[in-house]
């Protein structure tokens, strides 16, 4: 068939698929889907099954079966039942890629939803998952499924919190319960107190005009037309309200009525209360003193409504009044006024009359007899109301038997089976009595001729777990008329198994107790699972590995499936906010969730699983803001981006690597941030720009009209207030000309504004899954997101990215491909972005699409720059030679200290100690950067000793100046020397650590001051000042020595000249040594800097010992 024919067939098949509303399998929609976080929803056949085929499933998750119950209402549709025969089953576990295979035997708890003849089927589940399956599909050539069938609301799902259910969910469940309250109902219990379906009785007690009206016990709310209502005193779970225009009672009984709050939803047919009571109302106060001392008075008690954090409204009265019947008769009224009979308090409600099904509860009261001809008590002496507890389960009814299966053999005698299932709509999930399968004998014509072998049985288990065991299987010879053994060959087979060698002792990881968890012994390559620590839920894992010598050792534990209890509680609080019907309440609740998450993330005490959980929380928050059309406050927006910044800290790099083993969380976080940016941008005014700065990202959001974009896009915008140092000094740039933002006429009619967002990620390149070696992300990551997305006819987007890693080669520009679900090398694509030649250090890119940009480069293959690698050979040689020379000098001085003791000798000893300490710390910082605390301390002390060496050179120059002017007061001068040599460096380091809070002292690559943020100036600045001051002092001393009216004392002149000579020789060499040391530390791949440091450091040691020992001139 030619190409044109194939194209016509593909187009025809697509049109047929659109007409039928059914997509072929494997073309864009999965056949199995899992839904979580649904509190209530109504779903059509198209919503539930994007692909309508036999075996497709839709699974709903119950987050906690011990706390929640899941209810289903299946609306029967004849056409859907005939075409697909839907079935439902409850599961303990869920397999993502497993479909409902119609050929497999159905589970005993599976229920046929179309077996009942009624219009609805109500079901209740208490397991982790509920799966809806299609067991049939229309045959080929059948008429397409009607659109009315696809849009029919087939399934309704409801999730009830059995401990604290809301009014809305209770209202839905109670309406379902009334529909299925007959004989056949699958709902066995409810987590709510449902209203009495009987109509409400008259709301007022007996009066002279209505003697027979009893007290109302209905909890049905009539819809009043005004704001104030009148109610009676009722039990805690019963409320009856009447409008004010109802006929009022006599004045003497009107005091028994109290005013209440307006109901939360006046247009609802009833109030549905959870069994836990009203959490927002305080306890009742004590009854007040009777208003009269004689005759008939009244008593009052009150309570107040306390607002909960989630805005729960109180129900019921806030004030109650009752009569107080004093037996004392007022003087003078004995003959004039009669005392009517009065009812006493109602007794408590009795227990339900039945244990299951519909029963009744009663209560009684007694009447205080009338006096002096008064009226007797009116109204009933007893009251009753219905109680609806669990429906009485009845014995299940079996459905029809399935057809008999095929005979187990093709000839002679065999067996066949058939099965039946328990009907779901007739037994309330009670078990059916009797077997669910039957077996009978079957006979076929006798096998003629030679015997035939039957099928092989399954292989038995291996006899050994290692070191070559064996397995066995057998087959049976089918019966024939030939006597003897008619089948040729053997009826048994044996094969070897588990040929791998049993692990040696050194290939086993022993039991280990780590982080309050015990890891059992395992062999190399085996993964062990354990419970998470006590402050988290889930499971932790750890793998036994082999090192390069073949010795087993435990790898680091993985907490990617552990979620802290605080994050779990925050997620439950999020679900409670989602259950609120009002959009404003849901939006305010999401803002509270953001603030709580910001507080949790700022503590920096969480697991890798918490990072993935936080991404999911941020996604729910963004979706809720979008659905509720709620715009958060600017402070909440800043906290949202601050949460993302906390998550992208370099301290979390190992946690992200652990989390990426189960989910590409960092890639999902990028998408959430972009969605949130567009949510904020849609609420901005035209031409408005918003900027947000954090420690790890910079975000700008602007809204421009489609008709005329005001100016070109330049990012980042320098000089803004609040900008972090790393962003201010960043050399990364973005330029998008305004001509890019054009749309077609059709698209321009649909939208009027562009929302443009740009994000510069400081650390995301280290957190995303690393590309395949030797490629590495060598720059920051810059994201540009525009909606609606313009189509570029030619490359016009210019991106300049500065390298973060030194020693890399072959940089090339790449863009992120969001279409690939797996995060890794495959997501970076060079198509649509070309690398321009640039003489500068940065990489310049010209791109024809708007996306996420970065630079990939190749790192050297011959060096392993892991965090625990040993120092290079040049560093060790240079430090070793220098330390040896200085130690020799110190030993010589110690031997002859009595003869050479002087201020200059004391300065020299301290100077040598500072250089020795610096060399040792350089080696320590290069050999151990795994511990962040140790690396930070190493960087701080290295900063201190580097500055101290410069300060002691300055001290020697100061000493020569004092010798010239003749001021040599020994004790005072020595104290000032110590303050300058050790005190000044300590002050500089203390101030630097205090301002930066030790941030920048140590990086993942080296233990020295970070090159970003300007912290390096805390070393370069003081060192430059010391060198300048030293030069000025040297010039002054030199002029004094060379002038005619200078120093006349030859010893002082000799001492000053020796100090000046030492400073002039040592200071330049010291500056070159530490400069090369800084370059060698920060760029460990550069051999040139390491060799230079080794040369300068070695020469420095020999020069110091030569100047201060061999060429020493004064005593």
Image (tube, helix red, strand yellow):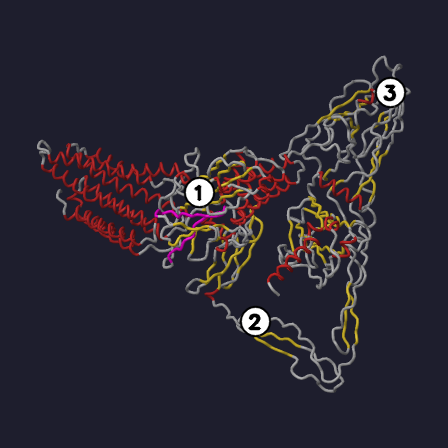
Residue closest to the far bottom:
483
Q: Is residue 951 left or right of residue 63?
A: left
Counting other residues with Cα less than 10 Å from the Cα at mark 2, is it few (<14), some (14-19), or many (20 or more)?
A: some
- Magenta range: 839-860
Q: Which mark is residue 53?
A: none
Which quarter of the image is occupied by the C terminus?
top left
Mark 1 and mark 3: span between their CA atoms? 93 Å
Mark in the foreground, 3 or 2: 2
Q: Nearer the viewer, mark 1 or mark 2?
A: 1
The mark nearer the N terminus, 3 or 2, is 3
Q: Residue 267: x percent and y percent?
A: 75, 33
Verify CB contact (< 8 Å) between mark 1 and mark 2.
Answer: no
In the picture of the structure, the residue carrying the numbered disc 2 is: 464
Which residue corresponds to mark 3? 339
Q: Secondary structure at mark 2?
A: loop
The residue that disc 1 covers is: 734
Pick the residue in front: 710 or 890: 710
- Percent from the top left, x then y, of residue 878? 26, 53
First in sequence: mark 1 vs mark 3? 3
């Amino acid at each position: 068939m030619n190409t044109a024919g194939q194209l016509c067939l593909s187009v025809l098949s697509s049109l047929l698929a659109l007409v039928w509303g059914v997509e072929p399998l494997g073309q864009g929609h999965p056949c199995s889907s899992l839904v979580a976080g649904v509190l209530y929803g109504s779903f059509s056949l198209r919503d539930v099954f994007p692909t309508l085929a036999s075996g497709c499933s839709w699974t709903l998750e119950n987050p906690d079966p011990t706390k929640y119950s899941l209810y289903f209402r299946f609306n029967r549709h004849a056409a859907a039942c005939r075409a697909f025969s839907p079935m439902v089953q409850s599961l303990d576990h869920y397999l993502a890629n497993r479909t409902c295979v119609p050929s497999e035997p159905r589970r005993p708890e599976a229920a046929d939803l179309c077996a009942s003849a009624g219009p609805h089927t109500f079901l209740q589940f208490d397991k982790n998952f509920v799966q809806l399956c299609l067991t049939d599909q229309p045959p080929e050539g059948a008429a397409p499924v009607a659109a009315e069938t696809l849009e029919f609301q087939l399934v309704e799902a409801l999730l009830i919190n059995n401990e604290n259910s809301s009014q809305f969910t209770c209202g839905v469940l109670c309406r379902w319960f009334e529909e299925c309250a007959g004989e056949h109902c699958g709902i066995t219990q409810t987590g709510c107190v449902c209203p009495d379906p009987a109509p409400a009785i008259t709301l007022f007690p007996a009066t002279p005009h209505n003697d027979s009206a009893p007290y109302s016990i209905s909890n049905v709310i009539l819809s009043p037309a005004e704001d104030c209502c009148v109610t009676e005193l009722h039990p805690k779970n019963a409320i009856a309200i009447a409008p004010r225009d109802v006929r009022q009672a006599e004045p003497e009984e009107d005091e028994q009525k109290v005013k209440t709050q307006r109901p939360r939803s006046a247009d609802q047919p009833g109030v549905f209360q959870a069994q836990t009571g009203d959490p927002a109302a305080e306890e009742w106060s004590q009854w007040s003193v009777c208003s009269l001392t004689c005759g008939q008075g009244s008593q009052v008690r009150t309570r107040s409504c306390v607002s909960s954090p989630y805005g729960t409204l109180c129900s019921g009265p806030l004030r109650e009044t009752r009569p107080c019947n004093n037996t004392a008769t007022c003087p003078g009224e004995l003959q004039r006024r009669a005392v009517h009979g009065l009812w006493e308090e109602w007794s408590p409600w009795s227990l339900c009359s039945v244990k299951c099904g519909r029963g009744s509860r009663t209560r009684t009261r007694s009447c205080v007899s009338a006096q002096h001809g008064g009226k007797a008590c009116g109204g009933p002496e007893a009251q009753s109301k219905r109680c609806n507890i669990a429906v009485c389960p009845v014995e299940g009814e079996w459905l029809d038997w399935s057809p008999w299966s095929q005979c187990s053999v093709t000839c002679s005698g065999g067996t066949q089976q058939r099965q039946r299932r328990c009907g779901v709509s007739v037994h309330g999930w009670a078990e059916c009595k009797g077997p669910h399968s039957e077996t009978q004998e079957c006979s076929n014509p006798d096998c003629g001729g030679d015997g035939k072998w039957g099928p092989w049985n399954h292989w038995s288990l291996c006899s050994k777990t290692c070191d070559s065991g064996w397995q066995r299987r057998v087959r049976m010879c089918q019966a024939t008329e030939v006597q003897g053994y008619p089948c040729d060959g053997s009826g048994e087979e044996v094969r070897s198994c588990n040929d791998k060698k049993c692990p040696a002792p050194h290939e086993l990881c022993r039991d280990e107790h780590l982080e309050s968890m015990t890891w059992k012994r395992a062999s190399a390559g085996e993964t062990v699972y354990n419970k998470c620590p006590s402050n988290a839920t889930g499971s932790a894992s750890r793998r036994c590995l082999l090192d390069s010598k073949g010795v087993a050792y435990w790898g680091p534990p993985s907490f990617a499936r552990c979620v802290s209890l605080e994050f779990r509680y925050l997620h439950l609080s999020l679900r409670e906010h989602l259950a609120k019907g009002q959009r404003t309440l849901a939006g305010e609740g999401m803002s509270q969730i953001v603030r709580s998450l910001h507080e949790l993330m700022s503590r920096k005490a969480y697991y890798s699983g918490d990072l993935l959980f936080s991404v999911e929380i941020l996604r729910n928050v963004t979706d809720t803001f979008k659905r509720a059309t709620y715009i958060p406050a600017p402070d909440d927006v800043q906290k949202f981006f601050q949460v993302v910044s906390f998550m992208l800290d370099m301290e979390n790099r190992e946690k992200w690597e652990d989390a990426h083993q189960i989910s590409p969380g960092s890639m999902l976080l990028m998408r959430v941030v972009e969605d949130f940016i567009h949510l904020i941008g849609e609420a901005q005014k035209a031409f408005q720009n918003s900027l947000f700065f954090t420690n790890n990202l910079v975000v700008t959001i602007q809204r421009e009209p489609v008709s005329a974009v005001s100016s070109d896009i330049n990012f980042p915008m320098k000089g803004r207030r609040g900008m972090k140092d790393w962003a201010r000094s960043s050399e990364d740039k973005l330029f998008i000309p305004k001509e890019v933002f054009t749309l077609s006429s059709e698209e321009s009619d649909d939208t009027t504004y562009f929302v443009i967002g740009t994000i510069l990620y400081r650390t995301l390149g280290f957190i995303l899954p690393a590309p395949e070696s030797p490629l590495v992300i060598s720059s920051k990551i810059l994201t540009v997101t525009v909606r609606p997305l313009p189509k570029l006819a030619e490359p016009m987007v210019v991106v300049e990215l500065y390298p973060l890693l030194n020693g890399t080669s072959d940089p090339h520009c790449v863009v992120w491909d969001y279409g690939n679900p797996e995060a890794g090398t495959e997501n970076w694509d060079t198509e649509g972005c070309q690398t321009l030649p640039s003489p500068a250090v940065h990489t310049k890119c010209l791109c024809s699409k708007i996306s996420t940009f970065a630079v990939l480069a190749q790192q050297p293959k011959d060096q392993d720059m892991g965090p625990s690698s040993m120092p290079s050979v040049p560093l060790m040689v240079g430090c070793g030679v220098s330390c040896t020379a200085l130690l020799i000098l110190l030993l010589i001085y110690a031997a002859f200290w009595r003869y050479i003791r002087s201020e200059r000798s004391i300065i020299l000893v301290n100077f040598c100690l500072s250089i020795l300490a610096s060399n040792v710390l350089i080696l320590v910082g290069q050999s151990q950067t795994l511990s962040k605390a140790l690396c930070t301390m190493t960087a701080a002390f290295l900063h201190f000793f580097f500055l101290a060496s410069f300060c002691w050179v300055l001290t020697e120059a100061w000493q020569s100046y004092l010798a010239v002017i003749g001021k040599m007061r020994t004790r005072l001068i020595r104290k000032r020397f110590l303050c300058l040599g050790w005190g000044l460096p300590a002050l500089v380091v203390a101030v630097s650590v205090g301002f930066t809070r030790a941030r920048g002292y140590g990086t993942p690559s080296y233990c020295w001051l970070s090159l970003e943020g300007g912290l390096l100036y805390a070393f370069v600045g003081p060192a430059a000042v010391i060198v300048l001051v030293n030069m000025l002092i040297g010039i002054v001393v030199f002029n004094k020595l060379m002038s005619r009216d200078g120093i006349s004392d030859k010893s002082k002149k000799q001492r000053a000249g020796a100090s000046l000579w030492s400073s002039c020789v040592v200071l330049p060499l010291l500056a070159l040594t530490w400069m090369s040391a800084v370059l060698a530390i920060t760029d460990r791949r550069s051999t040139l800097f390491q060799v230079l440091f080794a040369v300068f450091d070695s020469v420095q040691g020999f020069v110091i010992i030569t100047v201060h020992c061999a060429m020493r001139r004064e005593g």
